[in-house]
Image (cartoon, rainbow, N blue to C red):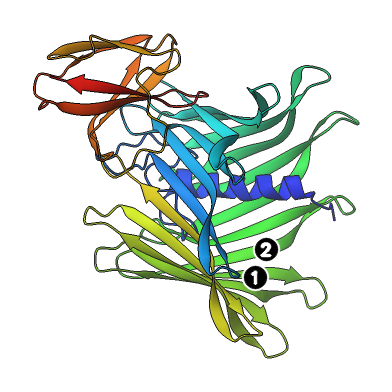
Amino acid sequence: MKNLSKKHFLILVIAWMLTIMNGTMGLCQTTHEPGNNPASGRKTTSATWSSPDSTIVEHYHSGTESWVLDVKFTYLYDDDGNTMQRISHSWDEGPGAWKYSWKEDYTRDADGYLVKSFFSMWKSDSAQWYEREMWEYTNDENGNMLSYIYSTWDPVGSRWVESIKGEYSLDEDGNADTVMNYTWEEDPGGWINLTKHAITYNSAGNPAEKIEYAWDTVSNSWINDRKSNLFYDSDSLCTELLAYKWDTLTDDWLNDGKLTYSYDAGGNQTGFFNYYWDKTGEQWVGFLKYEYTYDDNGNRITETGWDWDEDGGKWTYNQRRTHYYPGQSSLDQNISAKGEGMMLYPNPAAGNITVVTGHRGLHVLQILDMSGKEILHRIFQGESCGLDLGNLPPSVYFIRITQPGMQPQTVRLVKR
């Protein structure tokens, strides 16, 4: 059987997520990206405060028994709430500041369907983003994904090199029932079989079973690899996922993993448990769990994870993610009277002002009060934007501008 590299395995996991998310949102998920997920081929809309503008990830330090900053994600959305960019920042304890790490940029067509995404790494020595990976997608008229091509950037040849390709076949409801994945072989030159996914759905349209096949280059045939079965309650909320792996010695499916999910009265997922199968004791053993909290608007606020400590016989903190939404985030930039490359006039102002960024493209503008609470949120294209502040009471405010690939700029404004 063809052995999969770590890169190929990761790509195929993502491809499976794309398949399910494109067909239905009923799949059980172990993680949750609040708001609209950029991997979905569908055009999505959201309520004003349903998508976070940032997420802070902390890990638990057992020695000091405290949470330690680790990673921050910031997001940009278009007017329909679709994710256009996600930037990852790493915490540098030395200067005590966030530094760029990597980013993802998403391109959508006029209907809001995802057609391309880029993964870039930040190089601090040159202070530039360098594109490393690219995904290209095709969709039908209903936004159902039909194919993708994954390419990597070859810096020597200065070109994109195709690596993985996926093709989806859809049932009459637009759900992907078969996914074919191929890998590019330079010699002899062409796409060859890699894996195949066969998905079946229940009467409610939720994925009920997925069987993964690997291509055996010896027999030139598909062989069983992994299988997942999903179970739902009467509200189509996924309650359990059972995972199996194929055993060639017994020619049978063997237990591999299990996930169970819990929900509150409003249907919000409140957490999950992850189990592995203990062959010796012939029982499921829990090793990871997460618990989620929500605000009054149904926005997920925290995701807290625990690992099972077998030696201590107890659950220990693992990771915590906190999502900040417009109107909730506190200021995390240095405030100045004049942002670098950014101007606003007049300042002080009584009515209309003009904000000039000096950069073309998509911008997210926020007006924040002294506590960091968002007063206004606007997305605009171009180098400038006019604002009417006539309804704002006299006070000191901050105008923060965020643009893809650039550090946010915050300027102090005095409203008379």
Residue under the image location 42 percent in, 58 percent down = 206
Image coordinates for residue 382, horizontal then vertical, percent: 37, 10
State yes or no: discs 1 and 2 in contact (Cβ < 8 Å): yes
- Please tell me whether mark 1 sits on a helix, a strand or a loop: strand
Q: Nearer the viewer, residue 70 or 249?
A: 70
Residue hosting label 1: 244
Image coordinates for residue 307, horizontal then vertical, percent: 57, 72
Number of marks present in the image shown: 2
Image coordinates for residue 155, horizontal then vertical, percent: 79, 22
- Please tell me whether mark 2 sits on a helix, a strand or a loop: strand
> What is the residue that sits farthest to the bottom in this orientation?
281
Residue 302, picture quadrant: bottom left
| Mark found first going from the N terminus, 1 or 2 | 2
Q: CA distance from mark 1 to mark 2?
A: 6 Å
Circle 1 Cα neighbour tier, 10 Å, few/some/many (<14 / 14–19 / ≥20): some
Q: Nearer the viewer, residue 67 or 223?
A: 67
Amino acid on which the number 1 mark rests in the picture: Tyr
Residue under the image location 83 percent in, 76 percent down = 249
Q: Is residue 158 above or below residue 303?
A: above
Residue hosting label 2: 226
Amino acid on which the number 2 mark rests in the picture: Arg
* Quarter of the picture holding the C terminus: top left
Image coordinates for residue 326, horizontal then vertical, percent: 29, 39
Which mark is on residue 342? none
Q: Is residue 251 visible?
A: yes
Q: Is residue 237 visible?
A: no
Residue under the image location 47 percent in, 43 percent down = 22
